Amino acid sequence: YKNLTENRKLAIADMWFNLGKVRFMKFKNTIRALKESRYKDAASGVRASLYYRQVGKRGERIAQMIEKG
């Protein structure tokens, strides 16, 4: 987390706040991709989730923040 850009930190904080720790931690592949600096893969993980479909435009904004930093 400490090595992420501010936009990526904000995206993660937003997801954590909305999902809670338990549900956020289920994004195992997304979290792994973030740790490995594979931001396109991390954004794809967000886009493939139920969370993304439920939050509308906000989901795409979060995915773009993760992907583009």
Image (spheres, rainbow, N blue to C red):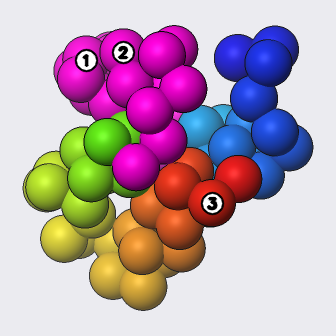
Q: Position of residue 37 (x, y in %)?
A: 54, 26
Work out whether residue 9 can be spotted.
yes
Q: Nearer the viewer, mark 1 or mark 3?
A: 3
Q: Nearer the viewer, residue 26 or 40?
A: 40
36 over 4 or under it: above or below: above
Which residue in the structure is indicated by mark 3? 68
Q: Position of residue 34 (x, y in %)?
A: 49, 26
Q: Amino acid at mark 3?
A: Lys
Q: Are marks 2 and 3 in contact (CB under 8 Å)?
A: no
Which residue in the structure is indicated by mark 2? 32
Is residue 9 covered in magenta?
no
Instruction: Name the residue rendered at 53%, 67% in the picture.
Output: 64
Assign a secondary structure to mark 1.
Answer: helix
Q: Earlier in the sequence, mark 2 or mark 3?
A: 2
Side (left or right) of 38 relative to 12: left
Q: Nearer the viewer, residue 28 or 38?
A: 38
Q: Nearer the viewer, residue 66 or 20?
A: 66
Q: Quadrant of the N terminus?
A: top right
Is residue 38 covered in magenta?
yes
Q: Amino acid at mark 1?
A: Lys
Instruction: Name the residue rendered at 33%, 30% in the picture.
Output: 30
Q: Which residues are magenta?
A: 14-40
Instruction: Name the residue rendered at 52%, 55% in the picture.
Output: 67
Q: Are marks 1 and 2 in contact (CB under 8 Å)?
A: yes
Which residue in the structure is indicated by mark 1? 28
59 over 29 or under it: above or below: below
